[in-house]
Image (cartoon, rainbow, N blue to C red):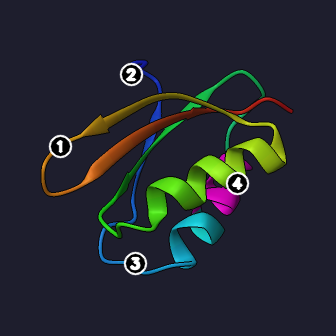
Amino acid sequence: MSEEAKVFDFRGLQCPMPVFETNKAIKQINVGEEIVVMVNDPAAKPDLEAWSKRTGHSIMNIEDKGEYIQLTIKRSH
């Protein structure tokens, strides 16, 4: 995770809210920058992977933290 990455905590949100919130969050950074998203809805990981493919933004890292999953996402455009 980059030092400058903005962190967004979407734990507690259920599908499809983590995807909607991630889509809003990615617009707050510049192209080439990264955000870190924390989710604990089991559907969020596959949903965000599908969102990434659909939008073209890159998931750089996925970490299972036990109680939640942390994704690092790079803005592509």
Q: Which residue, given by chain and number where applicable, does mark 1 sit on?
A: 65
Labels 2 & 3 near each other (Cβ < 8 A):
no
- Judging from the image, what secondary structure is the residue with disc 1 in? loop
Residue 36's spot in the image, x, y percent?
Answer: 44, 40
Q: Which residue is mark 3?
A: 13
Circle 2 residue: 1
As measured in the structure, the alpha-carbon distance from the residue carrying label 1 to the one carrying label 4 is 21 Å
Residue at 75% in and 43% down: 53
* Residue 50 drawn above or below residue 36: below
What's the CA distance linking mark 4 and mark 3? Answer: 16 Å
Residue carrying label 4: 51
Q: Nearer the viewer, mark 2 or mark 4?
A: 4
Specify the amino acid type for callout 3. Leu
Q: Is residue 6 shown in magenta?
A: no
Circle 1: residue type: Lys
The residue drawn where x is 81% and y is 37% is: 56
Q: Earlier in the sequence, mark 2 or mark 3?
A: 2
Nearer the observer: mark 1 or 2; the answer is 1
Residue occupying the point 72% across, 21% down: 32
Q: Position of residue 61 (x, y in %)?
A: 44, 27
Q: Main secondary structure of the magenta part?
A: helix
Please report the bounds of the magenta region as a residue range. 22-27
Q: Secondary structure at mark 3?
A: loop
Is residue 26 in the magenta section?
A: yes
Cβ–Cβ under 8 Å for marks 2 and 4 = no
Along the polypeptide, which appears first: circle 1 or circle 4?
Answer: 4
- Counting residues from the start of the chain, the first of labels 3 and 1 encountered is 3
Which circle's residue, 4 or 3, is located before the other in the chain?
Answer: 3
